[in-house]
Amino acid sequence: MPAFVESADDEDDDDAIEIPEEIDPEQVADRIVRGLSRKSLSVAEVEARLYTEGVAEKDALEILERFTRFGYLDDLRMAEQLVVSLRDRKKLGRSSIQQELRARKIDPEAIASALDELDGDDEYRTALELARKRLPSLRSLSDEVAERRLTGFLARRGYAGGLVQRVVRETIRKPGSSVRFR
């Protein structure tokens, strides 16, 4: 909370002068470390938080360097963990994962490196699994409508056009499929 200095005239609050409190960079750093125990943050996210808290640039750079040296901040490790999590838990495709990583302000080189680890076969299997789970809800629709909806569903999840077409072809048009469309 900012400290206020009262003017000589105690009755006139409009003349109160706001004096900013001294910012202790180590207290801010301690709060961020406690936050890092609950949620990983990118270097850019921590940097923004330091500046938002009013930490001087020199102190902020020293804190960032120290956090990186101690392993509290590692954009590559964070990107790799998020890629696995977003692929396995949320079943997202490459472009949606990339968008999520950019939103977290992760270093572009770390994003590229983490996305290189994505296996095309894994992405195909995940998309196929999603499509098969979605098929029963499309049963009452014509093939054309079901195909369009499934295509849109997979595209919104961030799967590439060619992969989406392949998966849709294999799930809807597959002879002997247990799901019948009108």
Image: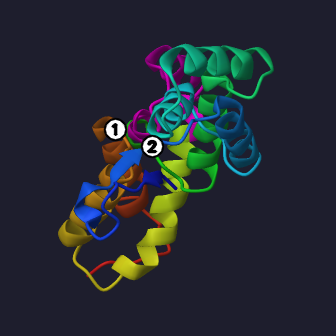
Q: Which residues are magenta?
A: 98-122
Residue 92, above or below 163: below
Q: 57 or 180: which is nearer to us?
A: 57
Q: Amino acid at mark 1?
A: Ala
Q: 75 or 93: which is nearer to us?
A: 75
Residue at 31% across / 36% down in the picture? 162
- In this rendering, would 102 be left or right of 80? left
Could you say where residue 53 lies in the image, as x and y percent from the top left?
51, 40
Residue at 35% across / 66% down in the picture? 10
- In this rendering, would 63 be left or right of 142? right
Q: Is residue 91 magenta?
A: no
Could you say where residue 41 lies in the image, as x and y percent from the top left?
60, 38
Residue at 47% across / 38% down in the picture? 104
Could you say where residue 115 lies in the image, as x and y percent from the top left?
52, 26
Q: Of the two numbered discs 2 and 1 on the same chain, state the one appearing first in sequence.
A: 2
Number of other residues with Cα within 10 Å of mark 1, as a class: few under 14, some 14 to 19, many 20 or more: some
- Residue 158 image-quadrant placement: top left
Q: Which dot, 2 or 1, sits closer to the camera?
A: 2
Residue at 41% across / 49% down in the picture? 167
- In this rendering, would 13 be left or right of 134? left
Q: Is residue 101 magenta?
A: yes
Q: Are marks 2 and 1 in contact (CB under 8 Å)?
A: yes
Residue 15, above or below 67: below
- The circle on residue 103 is none
Q: Which residue is mark 2?
A: 93
